Image (cartoon, rainbow, N blue to C red):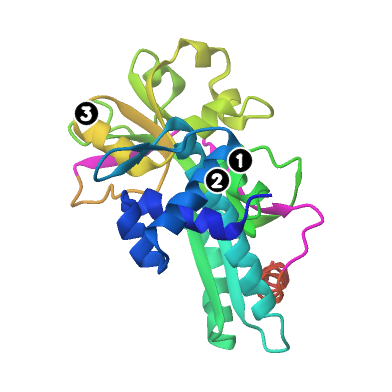
Amino acid sequence: MLEFRVLRYFLAIAREGNITRAANTLHVTQPTLSRQIQELEDRLGHKLFIRSSHSVALTEEGILLRKRAEEILDLVYKTEAEFDNYQEEIAGDVYIGGGETVAISFVADIINELITAYPKMHFHLYSGNASDVTYRLDRGLIDFGILIEPADISKYDYVRLPSSDKWGVIMKKDCHLANKEFIEKTDLIGLPLIMSRQAIDAKEDNNFIRWFGDDFEKLNIIATFNLLFNAAMLVKSGSGYIVSIDNIINTGDDSELCFVPLKPELKSGLVLVWKKYQVFSPAALVFLQTLKNRL
């Protein structure tokens, strides 16, 4: 069994890039640290570092272990914090992951209510698309995920949030389509499109793909994205048009971009999900109960 202490040693060396500096930060001797890492490499059967006279660099196997070690220790710290705060007074940390959407304001109101009522509660937000969020949820690194549909929620418990997002096209204001009231399917055929990877990867019961119908296969998708900010840079450069939900990036009067909704109208709902048979910390349970009561 890998020891947490040795994983901490390994991460310190990976972070510092130098065994001497890592030993100083850990308050152990360099020979002790070197021996522990050698024993770790022997146990795993792989070299974790490429060593030179003044520095070390991670091997491919070392990069994999760094990712896993960070996840393991994050879960350990989270579990320790939950038990530290398992007391009558509601306190502790709640971890929530979610995609980019203004509909998150409903959850933000719940958080504001709880930190006012329970000053020792703390919330940690993680941003990512559905695959990023469910990856962390499945490994116990977050308590809840907020998913923008379409998304596969079959293996989770969930509640639907009373919010939805409207789909449309983000483009430069000097584009020939910018003055249209709506964008229809025929307007998009042949255009260089930039699309949400989550929206086009979710094949089953997908309202987004269903909206395009047979024309979906005719689309010229030049790029995909998981978060919208960087994709907007492509639009500003003139590379293409984003098909996305509204109100995430600035398309107001002071922006060079605009948003034109789709016709027929297309909206996506939001769901709050958590692992089935999840045993919650007191803080996470209060959050869920408060949210359900508000619904």
Q: Residues within 10 Å of mark 3 (few under 14, many from 20)?
A: few
Mark 1 — residue? 43
Q: Residue furthest front?
A: 31
**Horizontal and vertical percent position of residue 136:** 59, 49
Q: Quadrant of residue 174?
A: top left
What's under tag 2, amino acid-wise? Glu
Quadrant of the drawing holding the C terminus: bottom right
Answer above or below: position of 95 versus 275: below
Q: Earlier in the sequence, mark 1 or mark 3?
A: 1
Report the Cα–Cα distance between label 3 and label 2: 62 Å
Q: For the residue marked with disc 1, what is the amino acid? A: Arg
Q: Which residue is mark 3?
A: 175
* Residue found 73% across the figure and 88% down from its top: 88
The part of the image, by quadrant, that contains residue 214 is: top right
Magenta part of the chain? 256-280
* Pick the front one: 251 or 153: 153
Say which residue appears at 76% left-offset and 42% top-offset: 155
Residue visible at 35% across and 52% down? 19
Q: Which residue is mark 2?
A: 39
Query: What element does badge 2 sit on?
Result: helix
